[in-house]
Image (cartoon, rainbow, N blue to C red):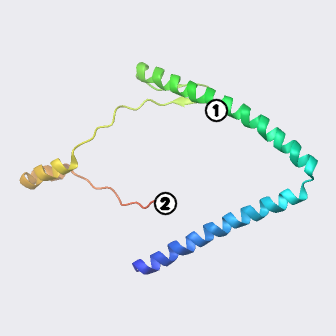
Amino acid sequence: MTEEEIRMRLDELSETLAARDVARIDYEKTRQQVIPDDIRAALAAMDAEFTMRDAAIALNIEELEKEIKHLVLAHGASVKGMHVHAVWSKPRLNWDAKGLDRYAAQHPDVLVFRSEGEASVALRKI
């Protein structure tokens, strides 16, 4: 497939995503038209109340997660709860790839220790 054909498929994807957004907006408009004003006001009040609750719970969750991560890091091993597992991972090693490539150019025998993964693609909205 050529780059132009891929570009066309990307544009098709963009149009499909836009169509989904329009369909969701149409649904929400139609839904609001069906709901009487008094019920819409009651739902808005309920949404406001639950939004406040959700924010308080989210803050509590964030604080607990930070505390647990700190404790598990200090503990140095994974810990399982009844429903949540805090998984400790050893520190990742990073190498200076450019420096190693320069070294390998002069010492090709080290290339037997090199492996290359597969390419991947991520789709990002522009």
Amino acid type at circle 2 is Arg
Q: Would residue 107 appear left or right of 54 to someone viewing this image?
A: left
The 10 Å Cα crowd at callout 2, few under 14, some 14 to 19, many 20 or more, is: few
Q: Disc 2 to disc 1, how far (Cα)?
A: 27 Å
Amino acid type at circle 1 is Ala
What residue is pinned by disc 1? 58
Q: Is residue 79 visible?
A: no
Q: Secondary structure at mark 1?
A: helix
Report the disc number at residue 43.
Answer: none
Tell me where residue 81 sits by quadrant: top right
The 10 Å Cα crowd at callout 1, few under 14, some 14 to 19, many 20 or more, is: few
Q: Would residue 24 appear left or right of 46 to someone viewing this image?
A: left
Q: Which residue is painted at 83% across and 62% down in the image? A: 30
Compared to 70, does 1 lie above or below? Answer: below
Q: Secondary structure at mark 2?
A: loop
Tell me where residue 82 sits by quadrant: top right
Tell me where residue 75 sits by quadrant: top left
Q: Position of residue 51 (x, y in %)?
A: 73, 37
Q: Position of residue 9 (x, y in %)?
A: 51, 75
First in residue order: circle 2 vs circle 1 = 1
Q: Which residue is painted at 64% across and 32% down in the image? A: 58
